[in-house]
Image (cartoon, helix red, strand yellow):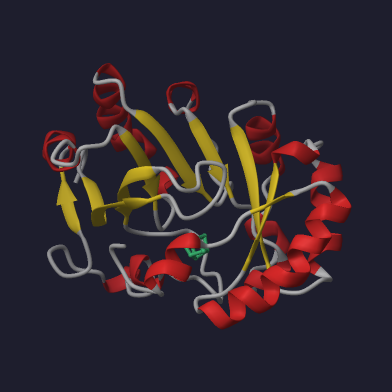
Amino acid sequence: MQGLIPVSEIFYSIQGEGINIGKPAVFLRTYYCNLNCCWCDSKYTWENQSKAKEGIDYFNLSPEDLIYEIAKYPCKHLVITGGEPLIHQNSLLKLIRRLKEMDYYIEVESNGTIKPLKDFLDLIDCFNLSPKLSNSGIEGRRRLKEEVLKLFTSKDKTYFKFVICERKDLDEVGEIIKLFSIKREKVILMPEGTNTETLNRRSEWLIEECKKRGFRFSPRLHILIYGNRRGL
Ligand code: SF4
């Protein structure tokens, strides 16, 4: 429905990944994604999307409803995540404009495959873009969109977070940052994993690689603290 936003969940937690790690934040998770990464930890936002039902898989909420829900929490930092939130950027704009008037800091997590509208690009405070590598199981032409990535690269508020499974993934990161002229200080490497054991095992060598290559490392703090549970 026009103007309504399909929402998977809203919750209050701390940002567990990326440049704002550790900050208390309200999370707005939208439903639907245009990719289907094999290791996705929020498959509930897209796995059933061809036959998804409102009230079961997602809730259609108006910007007014969402402001009411978001403002319940004692925090003016909002993370819009998904799924892929840019699918809904037209509908989200009204909400974002209103929240900016209310002095919210808004960050968006995106897979970087959908071109942002000018207003959307201008209003958001921080983009956590996560272009997918071949370890996602997605073919290159679906996961890397040159025009979109170049547009985001031109904005200082964009950070690029790559999900790393194996050492060879670092060669791909190197190729992508060269191809799209992404500055090294904007790159964040994060181990893939949905349990402490996998994350710790991968973090050990990934931290050493970050030290060698001058990239920022990000843990998955929410998984380490809460495990792979929804709404935390
Ligand atoms: S882009 Fe993100 S939400 Fe979509 S399938 Fe990949 S990891 Fe999951």
Determine the residue positioned at 82% across, 46% down.
214
Residue 45 seen in render = yes
Q: Nearer the viewer, residue 197 or 159?
A: 197
Of 28 and 204, which appears nearest the observer?
A: 204
200 lies above or below 20 = below
Residue 116 visible in the snapshot:
no
Q: Is residue 106 above or below residue 216?
A: above
**In the depicted structure, whether residue 79 falls above or below residue 133:** above
- Residue lying at the far bottom of the rendered structure: 197
Eyeballing the image, is 32 above or below 66?
Answer: below
Q: Position of residue 184 (x, y in %)?
A: 79, 40
Residue at point 44%, 37% (across, down): 107
Q: Position of residue 155 (x, y in %)?
A: 63, 26
Q: Residue at x 86, y 51 (%)?
A: 213
Q: Nearer the viewer, residue 12 or 151?
A: 12
Rendered image quadrant of residue 209: bottom right
